């Protein structure tokens, strides 16, 4: 397995980081909490074009999504990227912001004919909803105008990416796609979500490290205390391990090898656990200041937990992996 | 980022596999998560059996001992990627190259880098296994704080006189030479008064006492030096310049070790899956999820090793590799401990006729307990990562 980046991949990384440094400061994240509209200019003038990532390798998308997660970019891009993966199975082109409606109340991305879809991200900003129905053996995909669907907000710990219930009863059920085609949508969505979580963890860890070097107590930086150093090392270790797992999963999905089935569950469970670990450690290192609303660390902490839960939490993916290991 | 390497690299791997098919003796294929019973004498003290000597020489003669070196040093000028493929192919099959890694992994590379022409000439025999070396580093008062070593070598002009004691010295009972770190300047700061000597183990005044592990076997020893006369030409590198060589030696030791460690973890986790099915425990979700998480960790660690290798090969630093030792050694212990736990009250039974897989899990667990201590404890590793990788201030 060769993890070296191409020159083009380096450019994706650098361009994304420069873009978010400039266009997505903490002030924007803060104000998007109560007013999602503030993120529209970023979507209109930059992020829409980046949806082209859905037609590139998943390895490219993971590099972009890590930067996206690090900056905690508000708005409809994440949901739209997943929607683009799903819409590509019926060769539909999406015209604007979009999202995917698939899960029953358990949140798992398993095609079903329930009249209500749960855990649908960013439906408030979507013009189109890719509705998945049928069963795992016979999935169906329909692209439906959001205006035709009844959408209900659900109170959610991460208001920067609100979740909705979408009633799809009676709406167009679209076209049959192959189970394999649907499986690839799930794989790409899982790896994309995992990559974002790596970025979220990266921000939480980096901010903790910076604070530990600067904050003085007992006449020295708190980062010189072994008790804090080891906590930070453990979080960093888990994050690096998860980061590698996500890259590996992207490579497997791009190559469409059998190993991908295990690799995507590994990616999501490692990334979810690592982001949560980094969140708890970062808060502990920041101490009281990190517990304030004003500081803003909690926005990333919320995303770490909500992102772990999205498409099923770490424990669910451990169970999926166990099923694959013990099936034979 | 891609799945496969080049066609030349595939060809390299094919050639290796057909060589192994043809030449590798069954004893070298044993799963070496414990010391084999034929590697110790009746008292449990390590010996090097004839097959191991012949196998190492065969590897050397065919250019498969240390592939990155030229043919005269047991290699074939392999690239860095090919070297990794080589290590992984061996490790996945549980094949060991040599029963004593000090000579080929630490001594030969250090001699080639720091020795004079005469000393460099000792490298081929070290690599071929014709000369068995031990490495004299740790002492009773110098474990994690290696630079505090106190074995002294007094400069007498054309020779040194060595007095002191080494401990946890692997292979000392079978070695003919010792790569020995000694204090040559007791007034200098501790890192600046260390030198490296080659000491023949049959020199008068050298005494070796095998040191039994908690496993009951003795692979390492205490080595005592009493007025041992060492010729000046046995000084490697500069006088008082030994610390630099220790850093190099530890880097040589760690460079490819992760490949073996990861393969060991993967074998263990695959064997756990088989044992769970054999014991009919595959419907116990608390067990299968635990194994799934360990499986996930071991696969992710393999990816982390290769990712670190990629950034290293592209000229960047590879923080991933600093994490590998601490992560693998802790994972190994967890895996083997779970292998014992699955046996219920039988976890404490080591009778090979009764225990699962002949008591392999218990033996492997006891063996793995050394992994978080030897070669730098997990605590020292964490300190080093905190300061050198994460840039946190020293305590």
Image (cartoon, coloured by chain):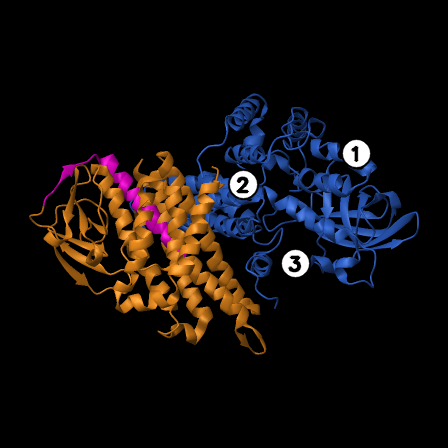
Chain colours: A orange, B blue
Determine if marks 2 and 1 fall on one subunit. yes
* Residue lying furthest bottom: A218
- What residue is disc 1 on? B121
Considering depth in this image, is A226 or B148 the residue closer to the camera?
A: A226
What segment is highlighted magenta in the picture?
A: A172-199
Q: Foreground mark, 3 or 2?
A: 2
- Which chain contains the residue that carries disc 1? B
Q: Does label 2 or label 1 sit earlier along the sequence?
A: 1
Q: Quadrant of the N terminus of chain B?
A: top left
Q: Is B27 positioned to the left or the right of A291 in the image? A: right
In the structure shown, which secondary structural element does the residue marked by tag 3 occupy?
loop
Task: Judge by depth and name the residue closer to the eye, B345 or A59.
Answer: A59
Q: Nearer the viewer, residue B331 or A160?
A: A160
Mark toward the start of the polypeptide (3 vs 2): 3
Most extreme residue toward the left is A170
Mark number displayed over residue B144? 3
Q: Which residue is mark 2?
A: B259
| Residue at image location 19% in from the left, 63% down from the top | A154
Q: Is residue A85 left or right of residue B140?
A: left
């Amino acid at each position: 397995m060769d993890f070296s980046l191409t020159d083009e991949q380096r450019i994706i990384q650098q361009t994304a980081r420069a873009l978010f440094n400039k266009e997505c400061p903490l002030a924007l994240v803060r104000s998007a909490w109560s007013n999602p509209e503030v993120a529209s200019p970023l979507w209109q003038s930059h992020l829409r074009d980046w949806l082209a990532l859905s037609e590139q390798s998943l390895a490219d998308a993971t590099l972009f999504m890590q930067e996206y997660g690090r900056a905690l970019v508000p708005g409809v891009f994440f949901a739209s990227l997943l929607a683009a993966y799903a819409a590509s199975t019926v060769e539909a082109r999406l015209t604007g912001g979009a999202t995917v409606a698939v899960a029953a109340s358990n949140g798992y991305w398993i095609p079903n004919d329930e009249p209500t879809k749960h855990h649908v991200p960013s439906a408030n900003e979507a013009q189109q909803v890719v509705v998945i129905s049928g069963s795992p053996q016979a999935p169906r995909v329909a692209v439906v105008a959001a205006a035709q669907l009844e959408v209900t907000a659900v109170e959610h710990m991460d208001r920067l990416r609100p979740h909705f219930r979408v009633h799809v009863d009676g709406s167009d059920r679209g076209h049959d796609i192959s189970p394999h085609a649907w499986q690839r949508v799930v794989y790409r969505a899982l790896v994309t979500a995992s990559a974002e979580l790596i970025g979220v963890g990266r921000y939480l860890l980096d901010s903790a490290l910076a604070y530990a070097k600067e904050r003085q107590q007992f006449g020295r930086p708190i980062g010189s205390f072994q008790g804090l150093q080891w906590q930070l090392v453990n979080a960093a270790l888990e994050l690096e391990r998860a980061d590698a797992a996500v890259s590996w999963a992207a490579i497997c999905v791009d190559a469409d090898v059998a190993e991908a089935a295990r690799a995507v569950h590994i990616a999501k469970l490692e990334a979810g656990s690592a982001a949560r670990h980094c969140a708890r450690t970062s808060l502990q290192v920041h101490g009281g200041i990190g517990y304030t609303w004003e500081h803003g660390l909690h926005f990333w902490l919320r995303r770490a937990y909500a992102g772990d839960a999205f498409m099923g939490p770490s424990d669910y993916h451990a169970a999926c992996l166990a099923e694959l290991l013990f099936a034979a | 980022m891609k799945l496969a390497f080049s066609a030349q690299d595939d060809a390299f791997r094919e050639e290796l596999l057909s060589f192994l098919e043809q030449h590798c003796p069954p004893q070298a294929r044993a799963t070496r998560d414990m010391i084999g019973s034929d590697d110790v004498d009746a008292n449990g003290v390590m010996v090097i059996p004839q097959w191991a000597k012949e196998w190492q020489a065969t590897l050397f003669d065919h250019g498969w001992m240390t592939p990155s070196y030229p043919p005269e040093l047991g290699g074939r000028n392999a690239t860095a990627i090919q070297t990794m493929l080589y290590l992984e192919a061996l490790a996945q099959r549980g094949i060991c190259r040599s029963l004593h890694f000090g000579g080929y992994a630490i001594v030969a590379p250090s001699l080639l880098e720091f020795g004079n022409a005469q000393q460099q000439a000792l490298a081929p025999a070290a690599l071929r296994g014709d000369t068995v070396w031990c490495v004299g580093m740790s002492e009773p008062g110098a474990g994690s704080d290696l630079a505090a070593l106190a074995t002294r070598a007094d400069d007498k002009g054309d020779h040194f006189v060595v007095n002191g004691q080494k401990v946890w010295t692997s292979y000392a009972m079978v070695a003919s030479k010792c790569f020995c770190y000694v204090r040559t300047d007791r007034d200098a700061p501790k890192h600046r008064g260390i030198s490296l000597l080659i000491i023949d183990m049959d020199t008068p005044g050298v005494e070796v006492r095998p040191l039994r592990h908690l496993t009951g076997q003795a692979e390492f020893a205490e080595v005592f030096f009493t007025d041992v006369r060492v010729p000046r030409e046995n000084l490697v590198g500069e006088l008082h310049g030994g610390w630099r060589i220790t850093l190099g030696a530890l880097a040589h030791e760690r460079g490819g070790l992760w490949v073996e460690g990861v393969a060991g973890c993967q074998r263990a986790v695959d064997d756990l899956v088989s044992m769970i099915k054999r014991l009919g425990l595959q419907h116990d979700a608390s067990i299968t999820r635990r194994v799934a998480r360990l499986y996930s960790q071991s696969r992710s660690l393999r990816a982390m090793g290769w990712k670190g290798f990629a950034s290293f090969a592209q000229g960047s630093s590879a923080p991933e590799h600093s994490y590998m030792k601490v992560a693998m050694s802790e994972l190994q212990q967890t895996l083997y401990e779970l292998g014992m736990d699955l046996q219920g009250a039988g976890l404490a039974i080591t009778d090979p006729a009764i225990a699962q897989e002949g008591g392999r899990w218990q033996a492997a667990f006891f063996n793995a307990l050394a992994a978080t201590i030897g070669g730098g404890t997990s605590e020292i590793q964490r300190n080093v990562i905190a300061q050198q990788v994460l840039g946190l201030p020293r305590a």
